[in-house]
Structure formats: C-alpha cells, structure tokens
Amino acid sequence: MEKILNDTYYFFDLENDEFEISGQIPKQDDVYEFAMEFGIAIDEKIFDLLYELLKTYNFEQAKDKIAEFFKKRYGKNIELNYSEEGQNFKLTKNKLEIPILSKNSGNLGQITITGEFTLNEVLGLLAFYDSFVSVIEGFILGQRLELLLRSALNTLFIALNKRSRLSEEELSTMEKIAVELAKYENIDQEFCLIALRTANVGLIGVRDELFEKIRLGIYSNDEWNDYLRHVDHGYEILKELEVQKELIDVCLYHHEVIDGTGPKKLNPNEIPPLALIIGISESIVLLKWTEELLKNKYPENYVDIALNILRHEE
C-alpha cells in the first residue's frame, strides 16, 4: 500500500513487514490520520521514552537512555549516531534517519538509529516527534555551548599564564601533576584539565603589581589575602556562565589546604579532591612552594606523586 499525505510518502506491506516513510516530516495529526485510515495501531509505549529523556542531563546520557529504553521495553539492540550535517528523513524497518529540525534553532543535524523496528513503533515515534526534538535540541545546544565555553576558557588560561610568565614546560609540568593525581583518585583526566583551565579565571581581576609580588614570593599577609580573593571573582564569573558545579567548586576551593588555613577555612573532608589536585599543581609550579611548605598542606601521597613528577621534569 502507498499513500502521500501532505507531502509525506507512506509505503507499507504488513504481510512482509516492510515499510518506508519519507519526504516531509508529518505533523502529529497526520500520523494519527494515516493510522486510522489503514487501521494501524500506534505503539504509544514509545511515548515513555520522553519521560526517560527528561531524567538525563546531556546528549551522551540521552543516547545511552534511548538505547537502554529499546533494550528494556522491546528487547532490541539499537545503535544511535548523531551528525551535525544532514537532514534526511527516511524511516524503514532497519534504519531511522531523523532530522533534528527545531522551530527555534533551525537544522541541528540528524540522528540515525539502526536496528529492527515495526511500523507501529515508528508511528509512535513520529507522533511525539516535536516533543522528542525539543528535548534533544536542548542537549545539542548545551553541548555546543560547552564546547564554546571550553574554547573561551582555554584562551583565557593561555592569556593568564602568559601574564604569570610561565613557560610552556612549566605549563606542561602543571598538567602532568594534575593528570597523574587525577589517575590516582580515579577522576576523569580530561575533566581535570578543564578544571585546571577554569580554576583561575578570577585572576583577571588581580592587579598587575600584586600578581607580580605573588609570582616572586615577596608579599605581605594582607597582599596574600587580597590575592586569594580571586577565587570569589572566579566564582562570580562561572556562576553567571552556568558552569558545572564541580568546576565552580574547584575555582572556589583550589586554595584550600588540609590544615584548615585556606581562605574558606575548610576541614580536610570538606575539600573536593579535584580542588586539592589543582591546588597542589599550582602551588608547586606557579607559586614555587618547596617540599617543606607543602607538608601538612596537602596529603602526603599527593606531595610524593607531585614532587616525583617535578624531579623527572627538571
């Protein structure tokens, strides 16, 4: 059987379980009209996928949730891929090519799902296409914004470290210390490097002459406390950008130390491990703290790992 309804092409052969839907993406009313005309049931169980997607926080989680949904509800293994290019619309029993066409943002790319599907399931997916796209749109835009933010933070990180006169070798050493400690704590290494670039955004508000004194280690207690206010400047910047809480915490607490003398006077169990990791990396490379200064400020195993890397770099 074949039918064209409002520029959408429908072909189906229920006896052989073959179908194709292509052309214009149908509106919800058109999907129900087609189903009623030919007496085909729409599988509305698939509507529950929307509820599952609303419990996710990013596009990668959404992809996993979609695969998990088809496995649990239908006993099917599917593979989902996303491309920023393309806007094909073609649904068959083996492949679903679904463009992400947003009313607000235009063409956001295409999702391709491969597996085994029935016409009933595909009609169910089409019936809530607009809701599906609205959720996926948020994840895609969020992902793009995160990439843009990372690029901006990386640019700022480079600029701030030029100001501190750190060499490429010193920056590399700081990264190696942070990554090695992240491995030790089973923290994602890529996320650790992002945290390293994020932690000092507040330095943009530190006066040049104060920054120079801190770098050279010739400062008074008042000047040191003034310098430490950059963690609050950074917090205000990142809060407005709606950055992940873990990154904001690193910015706010990376000068906390386990003897409780940090700017926020946190106890050891209150300091996020990633903040300690970024803190010791900076203390060794930027602030030139010696082994004696590091003692009682950071966990002994952190100090041993960090100094071992420093020795190999010298």
Image: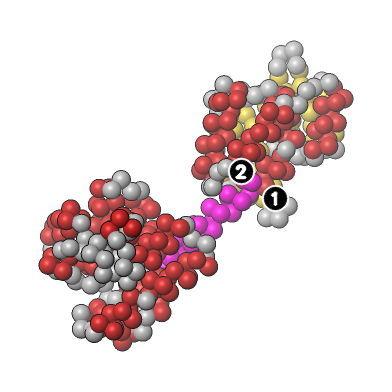
Residue 297 position by quadrant: bottom left
Q: Which residue is mark 1?
A: 102
Prevalent SS, magenta region = helix
Residue 86 in the figure: left or right of residue 236: right
- Most extreme residue toward the bottom is 209
* Residue for point 38% across, 75% down: 230
Report the magenta residues as a range: 135-158
* Residue for point 38% across, 65% down: 251
Where is residue 211 drawn, in percent x and y?
30, 81
Q: Residues within 10 Å of mark 1 (few under 14, many from 20)?
A: some
Q: Which mark is residue 87?
A: none
Where is residue 163 drawn, in percent x and y?
32, 77
Q: Residues within 10 Å of mark 2 (few under 14, many from 20)?
A: few
Looking at the rendered structure, the kind of residue marked 2 is Leu
Where is residue 62 drawn, in percent x and y?
55, 41
Residues at circles 1 and 2 in contact by the CB criterion of under 8 Å = no
Where is residue 264 drawn, in percent x and y?
34, 69
* Residue for point 29% across, 83% down: 223
Vertical position of residue 81 compared to residue 44: above or below: below
- Most extreme residue toward the right is 37
Q: Which mark is residue 54?
A: 2
Q: Secondary structure at mark 2?
A: loop
Question: How far apart are the two marked residues, 1 and 2, measured between alpha carbons?
Answer: 18 Å
Residue 24 position by quadrant: top right
- Decide which of 293, 129 is in the foreground and name it: 293
- Decide which of 65, 8 is in the foreground and name it: 65
